[in-house]
Image: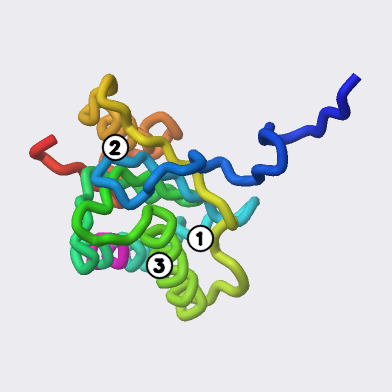
Amino acid sequence: MPNVRRGLRTWGDNKSVRLRGFDYSQHEPYHIIVRTRPDTRPFADRAFAEHSCTTLTTLLVKLDAYLGCFCLMPDHLHLLFSPDRSELTVGSIVGRYKGLTTAASWKHGLSGRLWQTRFYDHIVRMSENVRKVAQYIYENPERRGLPAEYPFRWIDPAL
């Protein structure tokens, strides 16, 4: 009987959950979920959440990436975007955002790491409706029992 480890299943020695050989700088829509460290809710701080939303939108504009939707929850971020003309990979863009917000978190009184090391990505397939993915992201606060007027989210009206 094979030795089965608990947790995420990986195949062989591949510890990555990314698709092997896939170019993550392609102009494709990606649904990203980035979680903060366990048992933390840094974005419950309104000022820090506002700063983090501004950082996200400013970064994506600067990198010439497309933003379809985002929702910054108290303990994680949902993001629908495409690298577009940025020439950077999804991982590089997410890494830059994580670095900028971590540095900003220290100025807001937090210490140590802000984010978990890895993040979840889902390449939105042609068979999927991008608008439905964006709507799912946008409606996340209601599913978690937060107010309908939750301020830390945005959706592209053109979707």
Position in image of residue 97 (x %, y %) = 39, 64
Mark 1 or mark 3, which has the lower sequence index? 1
- Check if mark 1's residue and mark 3's residue have beta carbons within 8 Å: no
Q: Which residue is mark 2?
A: 138
- Whether the magenta-drawn stretch holds residue 90 is answered as no
What residue did someone put label 1 on?
A: 42
Q: Magenta segment range?
A: 54-58
Please tell me which residue is depicted at 37% across the width and 48% down the height of the picture: 24
What type is the residue that disc 3 sits on?
Answer: Arg
Question: What is the residue that sits farthest to the left in this orientation?
Answer: 158
Sequence-earlier tag: 2 or 3: 3
Q: Of residues 54 and 126, which is closer to you in this image?
A: 126
User: What residue is disc 3 on?
Assistant: 96
Q: Main secondary structure of the magenta part?
A: helix
Does 38 appear above or below 148?
A: below
- Which residue is rendered at x = 56% and y = 41% of the image? 17
Of marks 1 and 2, which one's residue comes earlier in the chain?
1
* Residue type, mark 2 in image: Tyr
- Which residue is drawn at the image coordinates 37% and 36% (left, top)? 123
